[in-house]
Amino acid sequence: MLFHNIKYNTLASVREKSIIFWLMLFPVILATFFHIALIGVYDKDILFNTIDVAVVEKTENPNFRKIMDSLSEGDDKMFNTTYADEEKALKMLDDGDVKGIIYVDPKLSLSVKAEGLDQTIIKSFIDQYSVTESVIIENALKDPGSIGDVSAAFSEELKANEQLKLSDGNMNTYMTYMYNLIAMVCILGTTVGTDIARRNEANLSSLGIRSCVSPTGKLTKNFAGLISGCIVQSVCTLIAAVYIVFVLRDDLGIPFPMVVLTSVVGSWMGVAIGFFFGTVGKFSEGSREGLSIAFSMVLCFLSGLMVGDIKTVMMEKVPWFNNINPAALVCDALYALNVDGNLDRYLVKMLTMAAVTLIFTLLGFIMTRRKKYASI
């Protein structure tokens, strides 16, 4: 009887139009928009890339040319340097082939067409070189014997262009939006949970009336509903994760099996929360579904789905809230896997999710236990 109920509860869930839209189609659409609007921003505007520059030598400066050549070599080179006359350099700047033109005269100068991170880096490099050159010349006039030591010290500083990784994960700050999207699908499992309560309570639907007069015990029906709900919800969350990782090709910085594990636990938590709230009050079917979705989206908003910095604000104003917000728990678990070198913080988040799931499941069973009706 248990497996019979699981089978038909699963079939009933997948036939719900709201579940098909909110748990299958909506996350795919939102992930696509995130990918188009946000993910490429990190590579373009934040992640450092080699800068294309043109150098116009109006006077000879062998030392500067040597430094430029050294910074234009290797896999982690700072510049792609093109030596050209002024006319060619200006054309390259107008065409967008270079970010700036460095003029080598008695003094170095920079010409740019727009302002941005790359132009700022070039300007900082020129300023640093000019200061360095002035210090070397000044020391040469005061103490010619110190030229070698001073030049060596400043050369080491100018050649420093080493990439250091804080973590083996993906440092794209916008990837947290994808974590929040997976968390959103998990928490939208509240719609599945409330639907389980609706199908088993006589005061919530006509289907609940027929269910209550059936010979199957309420505990068996609710347990079967929860199992089927967790299965359906887990599949929906995994569809979103598969779409992000294998279709959009976004690197979450996490081994996919760990994404699956986190998604499944988060999905169970969402269903358990929905199951409990589905047993509270006497709202109509439409109102209950609307409140469930609204409640889920508020949690996702406070977790950073719409505004990435809101979680930081919550941490400053209400530091304890992120530790109990179900959406933040899923997001933080994925984030911890990405940036941490160990599983300590991840395990804390997973155990918290398991505890929340257990608590709301027990509360849901308590709310439905021995409930009686005047007439059915």
Image: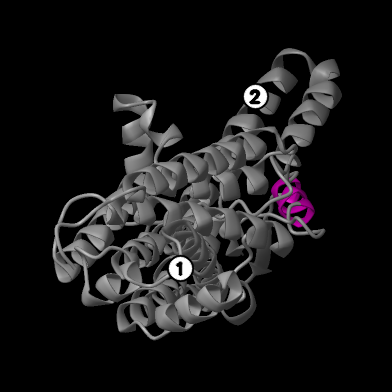
Q: Residue at x 48, y 51 (%)?
A: 269
Q: Does 10 lie within the magenta span?
A: no
- Mark pair 2, 1: CA separation: 89 Å
- Indicate the amino acid at tag 1: Thr
- For marks 2 and 1, give the one nearer the viewer: 1
In this picture, is 158 found above or below 57?
above
Residue under circle 1?
Answer: 216
Neighbor class of circle 2 (other Cα within 10 Å; few <14, some 14-19, many 20+) is some
Q: Residue at x 39, y 26 (%)?
A: 320
Residue 10 x, y percent position in the rendering:
49, 78
Image position of 141 (left or right of 203): right
The numbered mark, 2 or 1, whose residue comes first in the sequence reads 2
- Indicate the amino acid at tag 2: Val
Q: Which mark is residue 328?
A: none
The answer to which quarter of the image holds residue 135 is top right
In this picture, is 345 found above or below 47?
above
Q: Does 67 lie within the magenta span?
A: yes
| Callout 2 secondary element | helix
Q: Quadrant of the C terminus?
A: bottom left
Residue 309 x, y percent position in the rendering:
35, 43
Residue 129 x, y percent position in the rendering:
62, 38
Q: Residue at x 39, y 50 (%)?
A: 273
Residue under circle 2?
Answer: 135
What colour scheme does the image use? one colour
- Give the residues in magenta: 62-70
Q: Quadrant of the N terminus?
A: bottom right
Residue 175 x, y percent position in the rendering:
52, 58
Residues at discs 2 and 1 in contact (Cβ within 8 Å): no
Neighbor class of circle 1 (other Cα within 10 Å; few <14, some 14-19, many 20+) is few
Q: Residue at x 74, y 22 (%)?
A: 140
Image position of 339 (left or right of 5): right
The answer to which quarter of the image holds residue 340 is top right
